[in-house]
Image: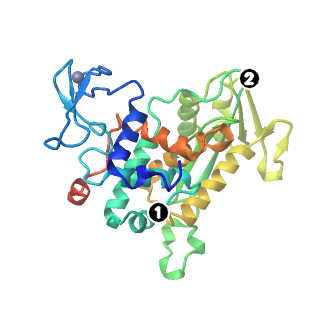
């Protein structure tokens, strides 16, 4: 798959591709869950891609119950936006999507957020396991007040106040999972570690006291003291999660410029998804884009719909 693929210009081909990707075993009824027991309506009198379920009698398409539902945006544009976001290591801005797809900026913004929802994990299993290693680290997202022009500085934001902290867990040779936390402490990090890291894993962190108590619950807990420039000691290092942060920061600073606290978790899901489905794990741009399409169903959209997005 590349940009010359007709699924990005031909709506009927886009629909066929979405159906084949979401329904490998035949049409799945979103009303009753029955697979491959539906009849497609044919002919000009019917909208494209409408099926009638022979089990429950309800009608559906491949976009019912997904983040594409109730959108007037042609499916080929959805697939193109999805491909661009999945094929770009640092993401694609809403401004870029607006120009590339020929949709309004507002529509592009909503499309990007819906595609991020598709990338978000549902019911994620713990990372790591016996014989596996998970690195955990935290980073501050957002511009430093002292680097801003004097007129733009907010004195209340000097120091760590007013910035967003991301905590990321990375399984070596595996997946990444990130969280937006209010501040770094044992109280905020402990529950995240317990829920998302298998207890039989080796845990690698810096010497921050926030990991001290939680660390005892894992098979092994090694710390590296960045304060004395100790970065690698045997298999004790956090270079993997640092590598993830460098991609995240280049994306947030270089592409998105500014990420509001309210939306940070959505951007983190996007960077987690691309990292967890990266080429080093054998997932190319096309396979990654298809994996994102498999995630468009069953997502609750919590941001407010605007009239424009609903009719775009
Ligand atoms: Zn049904």
291 over 55 or under it: above or below: below
The residue shown at (77%, 50%) is 226
In the image: residue 301, left or right of residue 172: left
Kindly tell me whether residue 184 is visible in this rendering. no
Depth check, front residue: 42 or 290: 42
How far from the left and from the top, in percent, is residue 41? 19, 33
- Residue with the mark numbered 1: 93
Kindly tell me whether residue 114 is visible in this rendering. yes
Report ligand 1 position as a quadrant: top left
Depth check, front residue: 129 or 89: 89
- Residue with the mark numbered 2: 131
The residue shown at (58%, 32%) is 193
Residue 64: quadrant of the picture: top left
287 over 271 or under it: above or below: above
Mark 1, other Cα within 10 Å: few <14 / some 14–19 / many ≥20: some
Mark 2, other Cα within 10 Å: few <14 / some 14–19 / many ≥20: few
Separation of residues labelled 1 and 2 (CA atoms): 39 Å
Depth check, front residue: 164 or 273: 273
For discs 1 and 2, the disc positioned in front in the rendered view: 1
How far from the left and from the top, in percent, is residue 44? 16, 44
The CB of the residue at mark 1 lies under 8 Å from ligand 1 = no
Depth check, front residue: 9 or 152: 9
């Amino acid at each position: 798959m590349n940009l010359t693929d007709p699924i990005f210009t031909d709506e009927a081909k886009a629909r066929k591709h979405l159906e084949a990707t979401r329904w490998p075993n035949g049409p799945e009824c979103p009303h009753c869950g029955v697979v491959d027991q539906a009849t497609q309506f044919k002919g000009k009198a019917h909208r494209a891609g409408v099926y009638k379920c022979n089990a429950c009698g309800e009608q559906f398409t491949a976009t019912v119950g997904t983040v594409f539902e109730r959108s007037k945006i042609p499916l080929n544009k959805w697939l193109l936006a999805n491909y661009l976001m999945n094929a770009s290591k640092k993401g694609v801005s809403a401004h870029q999507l607006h120009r590339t797809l020929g949709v309004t900026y507002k529509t592009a913004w909503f499309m990007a957020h819906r595609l991020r929802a598709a990338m978000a994990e549902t019911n994620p299993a713990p990372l790591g396991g016996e014989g596996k290693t998970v690195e955990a680290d935290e980073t501050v997202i957002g511009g430093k007040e002292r680097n801003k022009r004097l007129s733009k500085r907010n004195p209340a934001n000097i120091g760590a106040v007013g910035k967003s902290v991301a905590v990321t867990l990375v399984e070596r040779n595996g997946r990444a999972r990130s969280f937006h936390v209010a501040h770094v402490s044992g109280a905020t990090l402990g529950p995240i570690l317990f829920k998302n890291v298998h207890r039989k894993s080796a845990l690698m962190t810096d010497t921050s006291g926030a990991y001290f108590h939680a660390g005892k619950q894992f098979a092994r807990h090694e710390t590296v003291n960045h304060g004395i420039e100790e970065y690698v000691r045997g298999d004790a290092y956090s270079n993997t999660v640092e590598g993830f942060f460098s991609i995240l920061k280049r994306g947030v600073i270089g592409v998105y410029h500014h990420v509001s606290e309210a939306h940070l978790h959505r951007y983190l899901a996007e960077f987690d998804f691309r990292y967890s489905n990266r080429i080093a794990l054998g997932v190319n741009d096309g396979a990654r884009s298809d994996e994102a399409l498999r995630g468009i169903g069953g997502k609750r959209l919590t941001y407010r719909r605007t009239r424009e997005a609903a009719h775009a």
